[in-house]
Image (cartoon, helix red, strand yellow):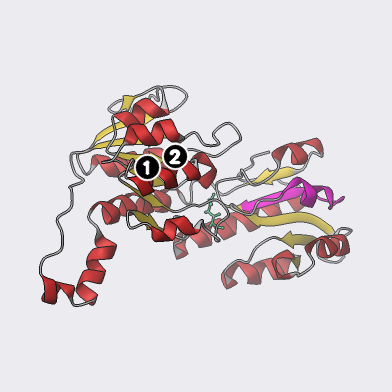
Amino acid sequence: MGKIGILQVGPYPAWDEEPLNAAFEMHRYFEADDKPAFLTGCAGTVRGIATRGEMGADRAMIEALPNLEIISVYGVGFDAVDLEAARERGIRVTNTPDVLTMDVADLGVAMMLAQARGMIAAESWVRSGNWAGRGIYELKSRVHGKRAGILGLGRIGYAVGKRLSGFDMDIAYCDIAPRDFAPDWTFVDTPAALAERSDFLFVTLAASAETRHIVGRDVISALGPDGMLINISRASNVDEEALLDAMETGALGSAALDVFEGEPDINPRFLKLDNVLLQPHHASGTVETRKAMGKLVRDNLAAHFAGKELLTPVL
Ligand code: 8YV
């Protein structure tokens, strides 16, 4: 019997490509110039999709594959997968939760510290010779003891909060209900009220149609000219136009962002701002975590085709 066909939506590191190629017949969608023609060409043999969090699988892709049984996502976020289209056909969907939580939280906190203390510009100050030539770098405002807001107290939001408590921060969060596992943190019932009482607002909620632009003009203006927005979730959770307007006018103090609309082709307005820290959607980007994510992608595919229970099912 031939190998099972899998549509590979984006590239993976070599340590994932090798075992995937050994176990399956991988169809490298991302390398095709004519993507619709490529899909038509492999439609008969593809029984699975291996995709990435930010790439997902849309309705057109799902509908083009009549023998599709499973979509295995390399990422905790599955908002880019058309779940409705998958559900209609009984197609299983898996993601990679837990294994990336700590790294995403680490980067979120690192972004807050780097931006608050101006570390990127401070490094340029040293490298450019300004330190020796022009003197001390400008003073920045402190982080410890300040007020932090966490929008979305799931696994990643909780891990962010645990780290922030090490900085003696006053921590509040907003979610659909108060969480028993965070008795020391203040529950706030709207994103705007959370922003109002925050110096640093972390966006850590899973993206969906309901959360689109949950951080809108009202939330951004409540955060205010001294506030910082840190987004390590999905760009769609933030109204990017409102964010850019607020940053350009000083209505929002600063931002640290790992995710963008249309990434990697980000809005060029971001590049003109000096009050934003830009990261290339890299919160889960450590060797250790990416290896664990790749293994989960493969293990879910293998379990499905062996008729076993999925390890981390979404659908
Ligand atoms: C990406 C992510 O999947 O977990 C998620 O939801 O967005 C990330 O981990 C990562 O960039 C790999 O594509």
Question: Was residue 69 drawn as part of the magenta stretch in this picture?
Answer: yes
Q: Element type at marker 1?
A: helix
Q: Quadrant of residue 175?
A: top left
State the residue in front, 203 or 51: 203
Q: Which residue is mark 2?
A: 155
Examine the rendering and report whether any part of residue 234 can be seen. Answer: no
Quadrant of the rendering where the N terminus is positioned: bottom right
Q: Position of residue 119 (x, y in %)?
A: 25, 61
Query: What range is drawn magenta here?
Result: 58-73
> Residue 261's spot in the image, x, y percent?
55, 51
Dot 2: what SS? helix
Residue 201 - label = none
Q: Is residue 115 among the parts visible in the rendering? A: yes
Task: Determine which of the numbered discs, if any, sits on residue 159 in the image.
Answer: 1
Which is nearer the eye, 309 or 159? 159
Q: How many marks?
A: 2
Q: Looking at the picture, which amino acid does disc 1 mark?
A: Ala
100 left or right, relative to 138: right
Q: Is residue 33 left or right of residue 244?
A: right
Q: On the rendered image, what quadrant is the C terminus found in?
A: top right
- Tell me, yes or no, whether the two marked residues, 1 and 2, touch with CB atoms within 8 Å: yes
Residue 14 lies within the magenta run? no
Q: Quick check: 192 left or right of 294?
A: left
Residue at 22%, 55% in the rendered image = 117
Q: Given the image, on which type of amino acid does mark 2 rest?
A: Arg
Find out if the beta carbon at label 2 lies less than 8 Å from the nearest ligand 1 atom.
no
Q: Is residue 137 above or below residue 242?
A: below
Residue 90 in picture, x, y percent from top left:
79, 39
User: Which of the two residues, 239 or 179, is positioned nearer the viewer here?
Assistant: 239
Q: Residue at x 38, y 43 (%)?
A: 246
Q: CA distance from mark 1 to mark 2?
A: 6 Å
Local packing at callout 1 (Cα closer than 10 Å; few below 14, some 14-19, many 20+) is some
